[in-house]
Image (tube, rainbow, N blue to C red):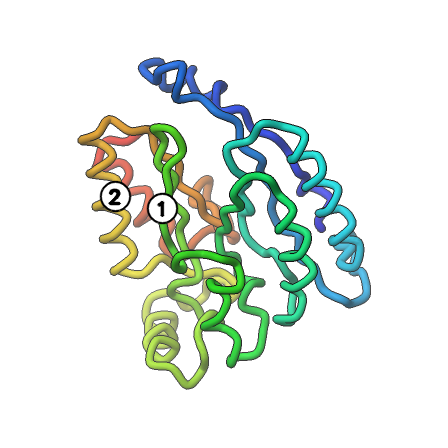
Amino acid sequence: MQKYTVSLLINLLLLLVCCPSIAANDTFTLGVIADCQYAEQANKGTRHYTSCPQKFSTAVEQFNQHPLSGVLHLGDFIDREFKSFTPLNTISSSLNTPLYHVLGNHEFSVDDKFKMRITNTLNMPSRYYSFEINNWLFIALDGNDVSTYAWPKNSKKHQQNMTLFNSQYKGHEDWNGAIGIKQLKWLEEKLKIAQVKEQPVVLLSHFPIFPENNHNLWNAQEVLTLIHRLDLKE
């Protein structure tokens, strides 16, 4: 677990400063954690892979002491190997509130034969999805949708992604990815519906979109343009 990644509680009451029209009964508290990156391998710098289960267990114990509406894990639940999911899933099963996963790049650091099983393993409805808590809409994006690593190498999707990488994203970090056309259209529809319903929206992504840096989504600007076009606040 990277030293700058900590388990924390975010009280969404703080967001009322930006959204004064939100009713008091729309507020709630979430647990948030990211980059567990567990694997049975030697530690590397500040990445203490083998101590992750103990730290994650402590985080779960802390979360269970609060009246949370859910816990978010923002990607890289494991560092490598499909078997690494098992102890973390066992620990997370003791949470007394729903756990919502966002896919990171390390979720796919597994053999090709396991890559289509990741969402089921993490109890996700699909690679990208949405859910509601009170009147808030949360949209979990899949930044690995277009990537060099997240689909089996013998799949049509992988071949399409490699063509896109070589034609549009050459020079970008190959451990990042982009949101595909189908997902972007889905996102736009979700945002438009939320606008009509005057519903607060939270976008969740393992890869940031701002400010510009080499960790961003390959098509971060495309997502920002969509947000601005719909006249949404960042």
Amino acid found under the numbered disc labelled 2 = Lys
- Residue 73 in the image: above or below residue 78: above
Q: Where is residue 167 in the image (x, y as percent from the top left)?
A: 32, 72
Residue 78 falls in image quadrant:
bottom right
Q: Which mark is residue 160?
A: none
Q: Residue 190 carries which label?
A: 2
Q: Is mark 2 on a helix, strand or loop?
A: helix
Q: Which residue lies furthest to the bottom in this view?
A: 154
Name the residue beneath numbered marker 1: 130
CB atoms of marks 2 and 1 within 8 Å: yes
Which residue occupies the foreground of this view, 158 or 164?
A: 158
Q: Residue at x 58, y 70 (%)?
A: 109
Q: What element carries label 1?
A: strand
Q: In this view, does 212 lie to the left or right of 85?
A: left
Q: In this view, does 106 lie to the left or right of 48?
A: left
* Nearer-N-terminus badge (2/1): 1
